[in-house]
Amino acid sequence: MSGSITAFAEQKVNGETGEATPSGITLSGLAAFVDDYVKEYIGQDSVGASVVMVKDGQVVLSKGYGYADVEQQIPVSPDTVMEWGSISKLTVWTAVMQLEEQGKIDLNEDIRKLLPDNFLTKLKYDDPITMLNLMNHNAGFEEYMFDMAYQSPEEVRPLEEGLQLAQPAQLYRPGEVVAYSNYGNSLAAYIVERISGQPYYEYVQQHIFDPLDMKNSIAYSVVEDRPELLEHKAKGYFLEGKGSFTQGSWNYMSMYPNGGNNGTAEDLAKFAMAFMPAAGEQSPLFKKPETLETMLSQSYTSAEGMPGIAHGFWEYPGVHRTLGHGGNTIAFATNLQIVPEDRFAIVIMTNQASESHIVHGLTKAIVGTREQTNIADLPEVSEVQGKFMAARRPGHGFMNLFPYLTLMKLEPQGGDQLRVTLAGMTGNYRQVQPYLYEKVSGDSALDAWPMLYAKVSAGKVEAVSVYTTDYLPLPASKSMPVLLICAGLAVLAVAYFIIAPFVLLVLAILNKRRAGTRRASRKLAAGLTLTGTGIIVNNLVLALRMLSNNERAYAEVYPQIMVNYGLTGLAVVFLAALLISWKKNGSAAIARTKYGIILPAGMMVILVSQLVFWQFYS
């Protein structure tokens, strides 16, 4: 492969100028520091990583660690192609700013003027949705879980079709709630297509990759279209246990702009450098310096001191102002951070799902952490305690249950300390300004949330901002008491319909030995019970399928939704037949069989009510 960026001059690497990373690591000792840091994780917690750092427009470190292919023992190298994940979003926002510079996009204009008529059909509010709303992830869209990514290139559809297929509903009024949105980013890319008259991937190639000589990258998820890149693409993996990895699939997307780019870390470093031209020089991406200045300026923050958003870049609280984006696909994890003040950038690409030790931990070690001013008079930490739900969530269909299973819990730990618990992860945070907390220890995965801010009004928490999304108080309809009642009823129904068939089997054997005959009502009750068992099994299989792979087309789960309808309809038939049987046999028959009938009927009512409540019929 060709197109490598110029290696850093040897005398400069040796540290003769005394230059250092933002955190203070000398450039002469940088390679040794990274080697020492990475060796603790490679082969144990992480499969492979490609790390590139640049300073003043040149590379100061470019190294590969671990394996791109574990089975074939192929090492990661500067030529290794990996999936960018959500770093891809930055090429969308760059394209938007290029068109804004040309006067073809107004960041404050309603985007519906740039879309086909009635393109967005699930809006709850008639308020304008602007390009800034898309950049700031506060257009109000729900998280639609289906048809986002596939495991084979044959499933990929054109961008416009992908947007229509996976269109989310709008849950929040534009501008009010930050809820990270893949859809919003791909919608912006579609607008780029409509304005430029080019497919998005062609636009990026011509206006971003070619000017930066990024020959080893593609703004598309189907790398098979570029055989020379496919040859060097790493396999992706899942961590099964210490030193144990299983191969995952590559990522294929119809809405590819939000996470479908592929390329080498050195190419991505070229992209990073383009946002930090030397004094008096112009970025190759823009014709006016004001455009770059605008793009890197803050466009949203939840509070003073809280890292916010800079026209698609996420701010990070490094020693100096740091901007960047992370990324995750099915089996890759990445991070890019730039420090314009130092003209420094770090790019980390790993071929492992949700890798955090290197992706976040090494980044933190290199860019450092900003010093906080001690404030004596701070609110009580207990004011922000509670359980909160992610604003980035499905609002419709059975997947709307998921965010209630992964609530964020905030607990005071004495003094200015706050413990954050989420999905089995724990982090300790310290209050540094009123209601503003910084992470001081805990799971490395939470390094993606270096700070959090609780918006408190009249003594109540209205929202908790954690970098890429807000967390909100539970709605009254799903308060903790309601959730506990639902959990209890669900456990009761599941236990009954799992155990009851075995009881029926034993009773059937006993009745056969006694040569007895079963009443029709008992047979109907048995049928009702087995129908409930079928519903339970169907939905347990559905849950296991989603847990094993949540990157699915809705068409894959639709048959199981139909099974829910069919079995529920059958249950209604059994219930109706039982009522008719009771009326026909009179009160004496009811007295003899009431417990054997009322119990399964009651359990079925509980089960169906829970399925309706959690939308398992859609």
Image (cartoon, rainbow, N blue to C red):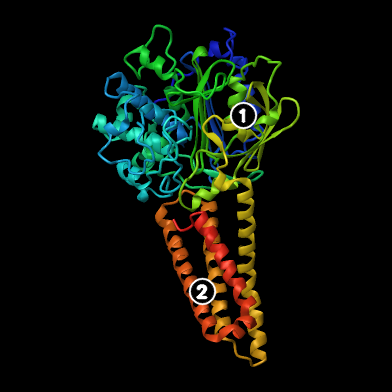
Q: Say above or below: 405 vs 600.
A: above
**Sooner in the amino-acid sequence: mark 2 or mark 1:** 1
- Picture coordinates of residue 486 (x, y %)? 60, 55
Amino acid at circle 2:
Leu
Q: Few, some or many C-alpha atoms within 10 Å of disc 1 (few <14, some 14-19, many ≥20)?
A: some
Residue 330: mark in rendering: none
Counting every numbered tag in the picture gives 2
Q: What residue is shown at x 46% (from left), y 52% (from top)?
A: 397
Closer to us: 577 or 170: 577
List the single residue furthest toward the left: 197
Cα gap from disc 2 to disc 1, whole angstroms: 58 Å
Residue that badge 1 annotates: 361
Closer to us: 533 or 30: 533
Quadrant location of the C terminus in the rendered image: bottom left
Tag nearer the camera, 2 or 1: 2
Residue 575: mark in rendering: 2
Amino acid at circle 1:
Gly
Going by the image, does 263 lie left or right of 463? Answer: left
Q: Say above or below: 282 vs 195.
A: above
Query: Helix, strand, or loop for circle 1?
Result: helix
List the single residue furthest toward the bottom: 515
Quadrant location of the N terminus in the rendered image: top left
Closer to us: 474 or 553: 474
Q: Say above or below: 46 vs 501.
A: above
